[in-house]
Image (cartoon, rainbow, N blue to C red):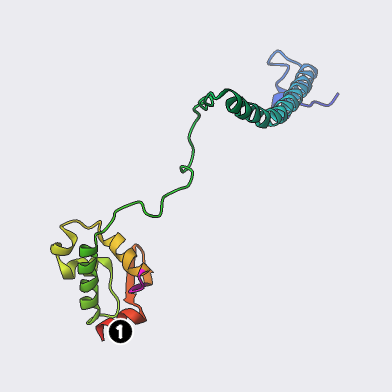
Amino acid sequence: MPSEVSSPAAAAHAAANGGTTELDSQLLTLLRAEVAQRRTRVDELAAELEELRPELKRYERILTQLSGEPLPAPRAGKRRGRPPGGRKPDSGKRIGEERLGKIRAAVLDYAREHDEFSQVDIRAFAGDEITGGGTGIMTPAFEALRQEGLIRLARQQGNRKMFRLTRPGAREIA
């Protein structure tokens, strides 16, 4: 009888280990049958669960409408990934009009002498009076200037983004 043991070495040493290839073969056949049976049962239960969940939600909603009671709190599960809705467009640092105006003026002054510039260039050119000693304000300021159409992204070298004035921005310095 041919052996159903997957490893030829295991089949050769089966007798020395106290087993027989026939016993090993039967054991593998039984285990495969059990695995197939369990897998089928899991699939059946998953399908049944998918049918029951919408019905349960519908019944709970109707019950709350009829009784006036609040819905039961959902069970807490593992949270994965980003929160629903993602990042809000207006979240993050806000920049005041006065500070944005100073950064805008610094960009226009710097652009009179240079074709391209980065946030670091403008910060070094303008000094701490614009940034308030911090560097984190430049990113939202440049984004605001980009959205208002004063500057555009020219190219990127690694993490360093180089900007240029747009045509309307260039008209302001002419």
Task: Give the image location of residue 159, x and y in percent.
Answer: 34, 62
Residue 144 left/right relative to 7: left
Q: Number of numbered discs present?
A: 1
Q: Is residue 151 found inside the magenta-colored segment of the image?
A: yes
Q: Name the residue located 26 percent from the left edge and 66 percent from the top edge.
A: 119
Task: Give the image location of residue 156, x and y in percent.
Answer: 37, 68
Q: Secondary structure at mark 1?
A: helix
Q: Quadrant of residue 153?
A: bottom left
Q: Name the residue located 40 percent from the left edge and 55 percent from the top edge.
A: 89
Tell me if mark 1 has few (under 14), some (14-19) or many (20+) residues whose alpha carbon lies within 10 angstroms of its own.
few
Task: Give the image location of residue 160, x and y in percent.
Answer: 32, 65
Whether residue 54 is visible to the viewer of this picture, yes or no, is yes
Whether residue 7 is visible to the viewer of this picture, yes or no, is no
Front-most of residues 61 and 127 = 61
- The vertical placement of 60 against 124, above or below, is above
- Magenta range is 148-152
Three-letter amino acid code at disc 1? Arg
Residue occupied by mark 1 = 171
Task: Give the image location of residue 87, x and y in percent.
Answer: 42, 49
Front-most of residues 46 and 35 = 46
